[in-house]
Amino acid sequence: MKKETLSNLQISSRTQLFTYVIKDESGAQINSYAVTDGGVARILSGKNNISEGYTYKIKKSGTYYVSAVAEFSIMVNGNSKDVTIKTESKKLEVK
């Protein structure tokens, strides 16, 4: 996730900001995991990036689609606003 404003921004989210979805050619999700981490508040200042990694071993060859979802809350004029950002799916060929 990339923040492109110079003003400070307070966000609240899980420790891992992103969840990842891997689907096969039929559209069935092949990965699943329990979200067990706690919440964290962070202040982003300047132009920042938040990067995370995720490892999942795909067991069968084929075409897969990977996307990520970031869910967090921001403070706007003293009020909390929920935000969800979804990436476009990326096609992956596993041989």
Image (cartoon, grey):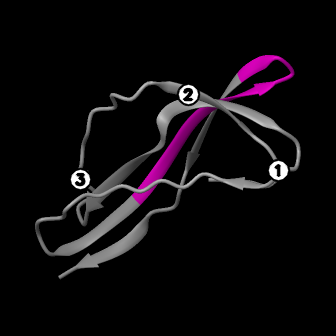
Give the x, y percent position of residue 57: 19, 62
Q: Compare residues 92 and 11 and report the one nearer the observer.
A: 11
Residue 78: quarter of image: top right
Apparent side of residue 28 relative to residue 89 in the rendered image (left or right): left
Q: Amino acid at mark 2?
A: Val
Magenta stretch containing residue 64, yes or no? no
Give the x, y percent position of residue 56: 25, 58
Q: Amino acid at mark 3?
A: Ala
Q: Which residue is mark 3?
A: 28
Residue depicted at 53% across the width and 43% down the height: 70
Residue depicted at 53% across the width and 56% down the height: 87
Q: Which residue is mark 1?
A: 46
Q: CA distance from mark 3 to mark 2?
A: 31 Å
Q: Is residue 13 above or below residue 28?
A: above
Residue depicted at 42% across the width and 56% down the height: 53
Q: Which residue sits furthest top?
A: 78
Q: Amino acid at mark 1?
A: Gly
Mark closer to the chain start, 3 or 2: 3
Q: Residues within 10 Å of mark 1 (few under 14, many from 20)?
A: few
Apparent side of residue 24 relative to residue 76 in the rendered image (left or right): left
Apparent side of residue 93 relative to residue 91 in the rendered image (left or right): left
> Of discs 3 and 2, which sits in the foreground?
2
Mark closer to the chain start, 3 or 1: 3
Q: Which residue is mark 2?
A: 40
Residue 64: quarter of image: bottom left
Q: Residues within 10 Å of mark 2 (few under 14, many from 20)?
A: few
Q: Is residue 88 above or below residue 3?
A: below
Q: CA distance from mark 3 to mark 1?
A: 39 Å
First to last magenta residue range: 67-80
